[in-house]
Amino acid sequence: MLAIGLMSGTSLDGVDAALVETDGEGVVRPIAFRGEPYTDGARAQLGAATALALTFDRPCDDPVISAAADLSMRIHAQAVQGLLHDAGIDAADVAVVGYHGQTIAHRPDRGWTWQIGDGAALAARVGITVVSDFRSADVAAGGQGAPLLPVYHAALVRDLAGPVAVLNLGGVANITYVGGDGTLIAFDTGPANGLIDSWVEAETGARFDAGGALAGGGRVDGTVLDAMLDNPWFDLAPPKSLDRSDFTIQPAQGLSAADGAATLTAFTAATVALALDHVPARPVRLLVAGGGRHNATMLAMIAARTGLTAQPTDVLGWNGDAIEAEGFAYMAVRRLKGLPISFPGTTGVPEPMTGGVVSRL
């Protein structure tokens, strides 16, 4: 069946929309992809809602967050409509939209996670059944609610010799380990682009370190790096997950723009290396998806730290920018079929479980 997946990550750069044909199991055929960037105003509004949400003990009604949720839903609707136009597909031919929503706070340690965006409102606006709120049921069952993409990663690598690791470098980094026997383990590894983006924006006004050029011209401060790595979270056995706000750029304050970028990039690389200590066997391939795969300095540092070539997923013909959105299309189909999307080895739920709220027309 045809399905659309929507993903907006903690980097707040925009909405990714992907159209796929899938049975939610072994068949996945990407058809089209579209990126809908956030305006500066939208980024500011969503950023303010995120900052506010992190001050709450639990999700609650708030006019600032409600306004941000409505904005996010409207931008996601534009992404769906633009994708359908680009692909020459009618909404009536699409079975379901997988709508991740915008994460404004992720607190599984407190028993909640918060993605804003009204699935029923989106369904009414685009004229397609929507599955939303993928994470809450997992957290309510005692899971981390993240990462959820491993079930899709496993489908993508099913024909590759294992073990294989898929590393997603978004605002936060997460890794999926697929063993040669099908063992599936996944967890967040630490910050990825989030800290670097925050540093670069504060120091230079740019939104990100394009290609890793700034970091590539800097020097890693070993003292700062060691201090950042001295965190008991990295020793915790998976499953485990993070909020982007769990780490800050404060330890790098006082460094030059280039040295700070280099040190924060090295921090991401070092945490990926530490993560590989938590998987059963050394992967034979390390495939990299997400925006961080465009950062040549980061990939080189990851290779140096892990001893593995960090290969962008594009070498296999996958669109590394589209994988997360494709994954939510895939999981939406699984939800309609009652198939699990999270597992004990990926989020820590006691048994495989499905997730997501279905909003039908």
Image (cartoon, grey):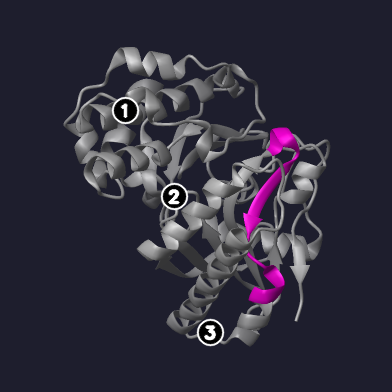
Residue 313, percent from left and from top: 42, 48
**Distance between the alpha carbons at the discs numbered 1 and 2:** 21 Å
For the C terminus, the quadrant is bottom right
Mark 2 residue element: loop
The answer to if 111 sits in the magenta stretch is yes
Name the residue type under label 3: Ile
* Marked residue nearer the N-terminal end (3 or 2): 2
Image height of 196 relative to 269, above or below: below
Residue 302, percent from left and from top: 36, 29
The answer to whether one can see residue 83 in this image is yes
Please give the range of residues in magenta.
108-122
**Distance between the alpha carbons at the discs numbered 1 and 3:** 42 Å
The residue singled out by tag 3 in the image is 89
The residue singled out by tag 2 in the image is 11
Mark 1 residue element: helix
For the N terminus, the quadrant is bottom right
Residue extending farthest left: 217
Between marks 3 and 2 in the image, the one whose residue lies nearer the viewer:
2
The residue singled out by tag 1 in the image is 301
